[in-house]
Image (tube, grey):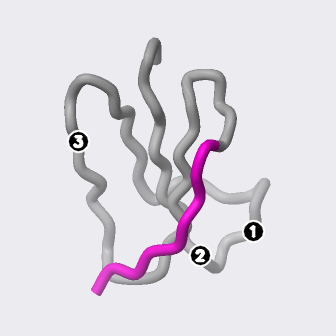
Amino acid sequence: MANGYIVQAFYKNEEPGIRIPADQLVIGKKKGELYLFPGDYILEIKDELGILKEKREICIN
């Protein structure tokens, strides 16, 4: 994942450490899309070393 970021969407009600991403993608030179069912999610954006750079909550209607 050289020079890119990974975006992971987790269901909001899942506990850290025992959760699996609902969807994820690597962004860099190309754009991508997450495919998520309606619901509440936590988005985590990590760099190529896996260091958390941003975290935010989203709601898909």
Which of the labelled discs sits on residue 12, or is there none?
2
Furthest toward the bottom, the residue is: 61
Give the extent of the magenta segment.
Answer: 53-61
Image coords of residue 9 (percent x, y): 48, 58
Instruction: Give the labeled residue for mark 1.
Output: 15
The answer to whether mark 2 and mark 1 are in CB contact below 8 A is no
Disc on the earlier residue, 3 or 2 = 2
Disc 1 residue crowd, few under 14, some 14–19, many 20+, Cα 10 Å = few
Which residue position is annotated with label 3?
32
**Mark 2 residue crowding within 10 angstroms, few (<14) / some (14–19) / many (20+):** some
Residue found at x 49% / y 50%: 8
What is the spatial separation of the Cα atoms under label 1 and label 3, in whole angstroms? 26 Å
Left or right: residue 47 versus residue 40 is: right
Q: SS class of the residue under badge 3? A: loop
Q: Residue furthest front?
A: 53
Q: Please say if 32 is above or below 13.
A: above
Image quarter (top left, top right, bottom left or bottom right) of the C terminus: bottom left
Asked if the residues shown at circle 3 and circle 2 are in contact, with their CB atoms under 8 angstroms apart, the answer is no
Quarter where residue 7 is shown: top left
| Magenta residues, dominant SS class | strand
- Within 10 Å of the Cα at label 3, are there few (<14), some (14-19), or many (20+) other Cα atoms? few
Give amino acid for label 1. Answer: Glu
Asked whether disc 1 touches disc 3, contact meaning CB atoms under 8 Å apart, the reply is no
Residue 19 percent location from the top left of the image: 66, 58
Q: State the residue at coordinates (59%, 59%).
A: 55
> Which residue is the extreme one toward the top?
2
Q: Quadrant of residue 47?
A: top right
Name the residue rendered at 56%, 23% in the picture. Answer: 48
Q: Looking at the image, is mark 1 or mark 3 earlier in the sequence?
A: 1
Please, what secondary structure does the residue beneath circle 2 have?
Answer: loop
